[in-house]
Amino acid sequence: MNLLMTRPEESAKRFVTRLPPELRARLNVVYSPLIGIEPLAHEVDFDHARGLIFTSSNGVSVAARLTAHRDLPCFCVGVATTHAAREAGWTAQNVGNNAEDLIATLHKSRPDGPLLHLRGRHARGNVAARLGVLGLPTREQVIYDQPLLPFSQAAVQILNGPDPIIAPLFSPRTARQFANTVTGNAPLYLAALSEAVAEPVRSLNYISLMVTPTPDATAMAGVMAQLVDDAGWVEGAGSAQ
């Protein structure tokens, strides 16, 4: 069956390489990013920042190309973002699974400021302003854009084919683009990283939609394994008939 990856390509490939081998072996991977990553800045404006905030691995990737400085501590949302920051050479700390966790953790730990949030043009949580209200001076710099993209030709081909498609969805914006542009009658098995991600696709004609119990890559892989088993059972039952 097909695995349709709609994340930005770098993040998508990183996720696929970390899937359990037995799960990866059952899937034909088709990459079709529905959101692009386009750098906007030419350099990072550190000013007097004493710590960095990353809320996505895309921000880490762009920032790593914009600056060689790795001396500031990083506060990251999620395991994948933290891992990406460490791989890029920063001393990184995972401070939660979402913006709410990050704000609560930093409010409690009170790191030295000011802090600098390096983010995309489309971001949720209003992190810098909310930390400022809590007495943690934080600036933000928009260093990349996330333009919406159509499905690739390869994606359209499988969407119009007969084989089941496992489609993990990681953000509300990606899910909305998926819902707005999906075509064809292929059996869809959807996995959403949260209820907010699931909401835009609930009106689609799918076989199954599952929401991960926690918003992280490990939980997503677990839900995908369940969907693969479900799709295989349905296909097997259909063939037996």
Image (tube, rainbow, N blue to C red):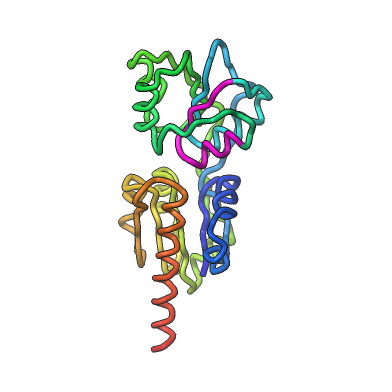
Boundaries of the magenta span: 72-86
Residue 78, relative to residue 170: is it above or below?
A: above
Among all residues in the image, which is located at the extreme front? Answer: 109
Asked whether 75 falls inside the magenta stretch, the response is: yes
Does the magenta portion include 95? no
Compared with 76, 214 (above or below) is below
Q: 164 or 159, which is in the foreground?
A: 164
**Residue 162 position (above or below residue 101):** below
Q: Toward the viewer: 201 or 16? A: 16
Residue depicted at 39% across the width and 70% down the height:
230
Question: Which residue lies at the image location 56% right of the left edge and 31% below the top edge?
Answer: 144
Please name the residue shown 55% across and 10% down the image. 48
Q: Residue furthest bottom?
A: 241
The residue lying toward the viewer, choosing from 136 and 196, is: 136
Q: Quadrant of residue 205?
A: bottom left
Between 50 and 170, the one lying in front of the other is: 50
The residue most toward the top is 48
Determine the residue positioned at 39% across, 21% down. 109
Percent across and percent down for residue 94 are 47, 34
The quarter of the picture where the C terminus appears is bottom left
Q: Where is residue 87 in the image (x, y as percent from the top left)?
A: 62, 37
